[in-house]
Amino acid sequence: MAQKYDKLQQQFLCCYPVKKMAWSSVKLPLNWAEQQELIAATCGHPLNKSHPVRRSYLEAFLKQLMNLLKDQEELHDDLYGNLCGRMAETPSSGTAYAYKHYLIQPGAKITLRESNSFVSEGTTGLCTWEAALALSDYILQHKDVVKGKNVVELGAGAGLLGILLKLPALELHTGQVLLTDGSETCVQLMRENIALNFETKDEVAEVPQSETLRWDAVAEFPWDKFAETDLLLAADVIYDDSQFDALLGALDYLFKQRSNQLEMLLASTVRNVDTLHKFMTELNAHGYKVTPCANVSACASHFCRDHTAAVQIISIRR
Ligand SMILES: C[S@@+](CC[C@H](N)C(=O)[O-])C[C@H]1O[C@@H](n2cnc3c(N)ncnc32)[C@H](O)[C@@H]1O
């Protein structure tokens, strides 16, 4: 049964921007029991207790909540308890990683350890980007796209998409899922994240695989250890045009390996139109046919997406 604070809970657990949260679901004044219910749904949630969100996020959330309740006579002790509990821990500046929990639908959630910075340890891949959420939404709204397919993701970062493809509760019936990234730190992190979301006793076929793969070294990768690829996925990998030749070289190699019986779904946040346009032109020059995918419905989103930046999803074939 839907609870009053479900939306706030979903937003809190994935660190959705505090100012944009569903505060309208909080009907003032809140009596003691209602305050308790709200706290239990957010910072007191068992997922946050076992794998806490970023401390600076918790502080911002509690500050906003206390501000909202400032005219009330009584503030619940747990509000201070949650704040002080975390303050007593290590200094916030010293923690580079924290957890996010993506509640996708009842019975289906993903917990990821992610970097607190967008760029750290020489890569952009240690946190989840909007394009990965948009591509996840697209797949959940078009499940046939992955059904029975062996999938390889390029530039998989922290691993959200591949973990989603294998989540039993989503019943996507995907074949083998191989997550790759050129950064070994990302591959280590995605392995940790895979372990967080699957049981060690799960059959190998039921769990995403993860390997280091730099696009300029695609020919040296041990492809024979994996099933034939049917579908390539990539999210937010078109931002640095110095990597275009390597990425197109990787696509050429993989499409040739499958005699062009391959599709790629590419999701890109529209930050710089010229950069995207340049990549489209190069795809065209390499003989690829690009089809824009049907719009991903924002209303039917399974994630808390900000929608401040547009995400373009295209299908690439040859
Ligand atoms: C912006 S992140 C996106 C991560 C993830 N797909 C997401 O959307 O959350 C880009 C990813 O591409 C990877 N990458 C960039 N250049 C690469 C290359 N030449 N070979 C392999 N991976 C690369 C980075 O390591 C990083 O993980």
Image (cartoon, rainbow, N blue to C red):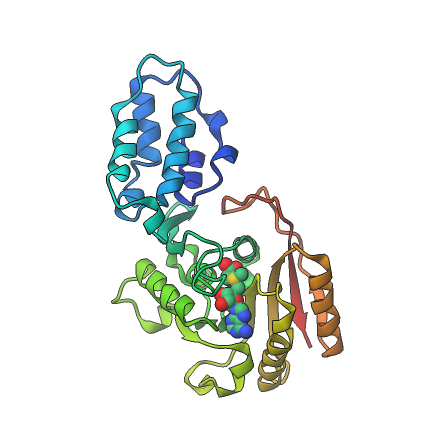
Q: Residue at x 56, y 66 (%)?
A: 234
Depth check: give the residue in front, 108 or 268: 268
Indicate the position of residue 116 as horizontal and vertical percent values.
Answer: 41, 51
Of the 4 image quadrants, the one containing the N terminus is: top left
- Residue 89 versus residue 76: which sits nearer the camera? 89
Identify the residue at horizontal 34%, vertical 34% (top origin): 41
Q: Is residue 163 above or below residue 181?
A: above
Q: Residue at x 47, y 65 (%)?
A: 122
Quarter of the view holding residue 74: top left
| Left or right position of 260 against 234 | right
Instruction: Please give left or right for residue 132 compared with residue 285 in the image.
Output: left
- Residue 81 in the figure: left or right of residue 258: left
From what the image shows, is residue 100 above or below residue 237? above
Say if 123 sits above or below 259 in the image: above
User: In the rendered image, which quarter is residue 204 located in?
Assistant: bottom left
Q: Which residue reaches farthest top? A: 73
The answer to whether one can see residue 2 in this image is no
Residue 180 horizontal/vertical position (percent): 46, 72
Horizontal and vertical percent position of residue 127: 45, 56
Residue 159 lies in quadrant: bottom left
Image quadrant where one finds the C terminus:
bottom right
User: In the image, is 25 to the left or to the right of 193?
Assistant: right
Instruction: Report whether residue 238 is seen.
Output: yes
